[in-house]
């Protein structure tokens, strides 16, 4: 199953020619989930040749413009291009008013169903699930209500060993039970332990998106052990006070969270436009957590 | 005096990699006026290396997203980059609510003075003037309240002939009177006619921006004789019914307005994304008004 993320925007508040502000596109088995949607996101989607009508869900982490000013344009383009499929949108409550006012001002009634879901929880909360993934939100600490997101593959069923099917005659009706982990007793009374018949399914993969936030160890339990963690790193450690004042994190802080949460791989982004050479930023993070990568617009990561 | 316009966006509702939606930047004596501000406009401003803190006025023709979805991003970037100068913004009344709601949602109080001016007039109306230009708005016919704009240089003072200064001794205090067109009588009683002493100032130049509109001859008196007319041309004549249904114009209609208004030069834009080869569009318009040009993003025109 495809489970990958493409970085549509790796910059922070001020767009540059090199870095668009925040937007990540998650591909879960060829259904697309968009996480944040800064100005220019729809252009990025075109640039990276993504079929954007496949987006089924959009999650907006918070209402700072560099995370959602591209949303109205994308919603409008869906409309103009004749979208019929429903779209689920998650964001802070005021987002609905912002959208409604602008649709009203343009005299637009969207031709596709747009379902708005308010993000209000103060705890780790299931937002939705389908047969492939669960998506949770959790609050992070920023100057306005802000949410991180966790995308976790569902555990697949056990896989029946090929050689078993050649050697043991198992009725077709029993197969689902084996996949669920049950043992099998054949007509002669011989018991086959499930572990003899099946192999473990792949370990479920997970991706965590930790957007604009102060360094906050409270998120560690939510993201513990995840395969890929995105954590913002607006500044380096020499601007720690700026980071605190603006409720952002440094590269070293992002790496510390990654280390304490024992994730497999860390990607950092949301860089202040002041940083042009990213090597020092990368080295700072890797001094704490070696499996760190600095993202660029257009990068894709298999999870 | 510089009087030029740069096309930041020449496309219509759906952005493409080649054409951003509407935004024109007018340079009046090195002060910049932005006309419409579609998503991505601030990126276009960077791309064309324009010093965007020099923008003193922004005019939004109407509240369709392809004319203003980049406004919040630009206002926010001004703020983040430490703008101090006041900014004057003109647009339909609802725009103020749209801006205020989004500033409130992000907890932002702009650090520069933003003066909002509602566009409501049903007639040709002076919006503002300075020592160099006057700016008027006039209603056009579209599916929501929509305005065209006329930028007209003020008539400069008469210029004193160089050879006069060499041959006639004119007191310094008299100069302003000569520039205003008065005659001069010297101490001996000899009268010099103003035309002997001065030359005509350059003819004032003008630029008209006729955004999304049905073909509408009512605008002709407002734009009559202007040096450069921008008129939208979303479709070609073979899609005349589409143009009417969507309250847009064809290339031929834009050219007809240009011809009837006896303008010097016509530029057309706001092309539907369906048109890739612009040659037929250009030929259609030139068959009616030869001095027509198809604009591309980044084009500049001296007025």
Image (tube, coloured by chain):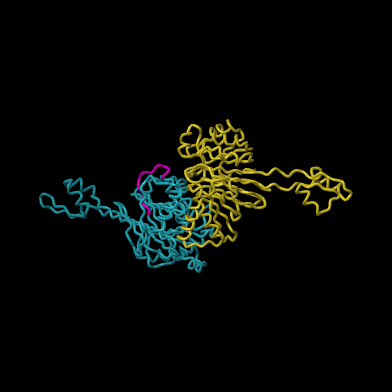
Chain colours: A yellow, B cyan
Q: Is residue B139 above or below residue A66?
A: below
Q: Please name the residue shown 48% across and 39% down the image.
A: A247
Q: Nearer the viewer, residue A12 or A150?
A: A150
Res B48 visible: yes
Furthest residue toward front = A189
Q: Position of residue A234 (x, y in %)?
A: 51, 38
Furthest residue toward right = A188
Q: Position of residue A117 (x, y in %)?
A: 55, 54
Q: Position of residue A124 (x, y in %)?
A: 58, 45
Does the magenta-highlighted stretch encompass residue A196?
no
Furthest residue toward top = A287
The magenta region covers B79-89
Q: Position of residue A205 (x, y in %)?
A: 66, 43
Q: Nearer the viewer, residue A104 or B84?
A: A104
Furthest residue toward left = B188
Q: How many marks?
A: 0
Q: Is residue A198 left or right of residue A104?
A: right
Q: Is residue B200 left or right of residue B80?
A: left
Q: Please name the residue shown 80% across and 52% down the image.
A: A174
Does the magenta-highlighted stretch encompass residue B87?
yes
Q: Is residue B239 above or below residue A75?
A: below
Res A49 visible: no
Q: Is residue B217 left or right of residue A144?
A: left
Tell me the quarter of the image containing the C terminus of chain B.
bottom left
Quarter assignment of residue B51: top left
């Amino acid at each position: 199953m495809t489970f990958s993320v493409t970085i549509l925007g790796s910059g922070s508040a001020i767009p540059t020619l090199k870095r668009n502000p925040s937007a990540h596109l998650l591909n879960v088995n060829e259904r697309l989930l968009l996480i944040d949607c800064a100005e220019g996101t729809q252009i990025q989607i075109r640039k990276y040749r993504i079929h954007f009508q496949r987006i089924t869900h959009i999650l907006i982490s918070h209402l700072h413009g560099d995370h959602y000013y591209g949303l109205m344009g994308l919603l409008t383009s869906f409309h103009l291009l004749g979208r019929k499929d429903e779209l689920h949108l998650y964001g802070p409550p005021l987002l609905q008013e912002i959208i409604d006012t602008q649709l009203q001002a343009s005299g637009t009634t969207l031709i596709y169903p747009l379902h708005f879901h308010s993000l209000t929880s103060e705890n780790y909360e299931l937002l939705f699930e389908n047969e492939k993934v669960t998506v949770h939100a959790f609050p992070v600490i920023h100057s306005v209500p802000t949410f991180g997101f966790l995308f976790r593959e569902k555990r697949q069923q056990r896989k029946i060993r090929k050689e078993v099917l050649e050697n043991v005659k198992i009725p077709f009706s029993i197969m689902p039970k084996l996949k669920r982990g049950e043992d099998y007793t054949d007509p002669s009374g011989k018991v086959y332990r499930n572990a003899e018949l099946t192999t473990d399914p792949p370990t479920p993969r997970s991706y965590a998106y930790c957007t604009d936030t102060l360094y906050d160890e409270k998120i560690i339990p939510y993201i513990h052990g995840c395969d890929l963690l995105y954590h913002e790193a607006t500044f380096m450690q020499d601007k720690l006070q700026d980071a605190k004042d603006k409720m952002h994190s440094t590269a070293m802080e992002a790496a510390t969270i990654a280390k304490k949460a024992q994730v497999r791989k860390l990607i950092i982004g949301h860089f202040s436009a002041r940083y042009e050479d990213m090597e020092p930023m990368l080295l700072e993070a890797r001094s704490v957590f070696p499996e760190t990568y600095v993202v660029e617009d257009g990068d894709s990561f298999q999870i």
